[in-house]
Amino acid sequence: MDEKQSQYKDIPKEFHSYEKDGLFTNCIECDRELLSGDCDYVIEKAFRNYQGFKAEDVIFDYAICMDCAMEIQKRMSKESMFKIQEYMQKQMLDRHQDLAKRDLTNVDELYSKCMFTNEDKSNCEEYQVFAFCRGDKMNLQMPPYMVSGPILDEISELLSDETRDELNGFFNKHFSPSPGMFEPDPRLILI
């Protein structure tokens, strides 16, 4: 297998659309066809674990093409972007050796623990997973990862009101949650 083929793996079921029970087919923002393989896109899924019951729910999930993700990112405040980048660089520096040891052939292992704290997803009340994809494949040059609820809270605290409004606007445009499901606000990352 050549290097280019080995960087792409089938998208695991955990990254399939909860609503469609299959691969995401279109960008949530612009409706661009994603499976044709002519664009990169990101899948973001949020889960809630019910500790002690071995049960979890998908809070939200979507796929967004990189063009739309970049447009939304441009509308985020410079202050928020700087704080998030600074936070992530510090976190990555602290975990660099652990992250470098990750086995890219074991895709499930890549998103089973928080990339910042190494906490297993089964111990997290809430967590989000992210994958970078092209067509019907996951791109392992940018490996999938998981972020635990406490880290999502820390990142959320870094956001300016302007950025929080932008992300809440995106969320409200695409999702109509049942009352009380998101307390306080859903935590979108849009990396």
Image: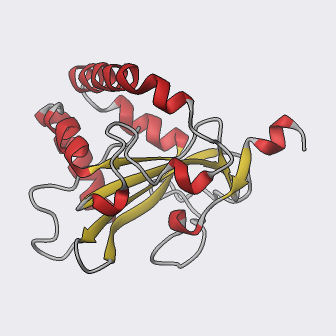
For the point 28% across and 31% down, the residue is 76
Q: Residue at x 54, y 41 (%)?
A: 66
Q: Residue at x 13, y 36 (%)?
A: 157
In the image, 191: left or right of 76? right
Q: Is residue 177 above or below residue 84?
A: below
Quarter of the view holding residue 135: bottom right
Q: Is residue 137 left or right of residue 72?
A: right
Horizontal and vertical percent for residue 54? Answer: 32, 78
| Residue at the spot 23% in from the left edge and 62% down from the top edge | 125
Q: Is residue 172 found left or right of 104 in the rendered image?
A: left
Q: How is the image coloured?
A: secondary structure
In-image side of 182 versus 122 (left or right): left
**Residue 44 on image: x %, y %:** 43, 54
Say if 127 sits above or below 38 in the image. Answer: below
Q: How many marks?
A: 0
Quadrant in the picture for residue 19: bottom left
Q: Quadrant of the N terminus?
A: top right
Q: Which quarter of the rendering shows the C terminus?
A: top left
Residue 27 horizontal/vertical position (percent): 52, 57
Q: Is residue 152 above or below residue 71?
A: below
Where is residue 63? Give x, y as percent. Answer: 50, 56
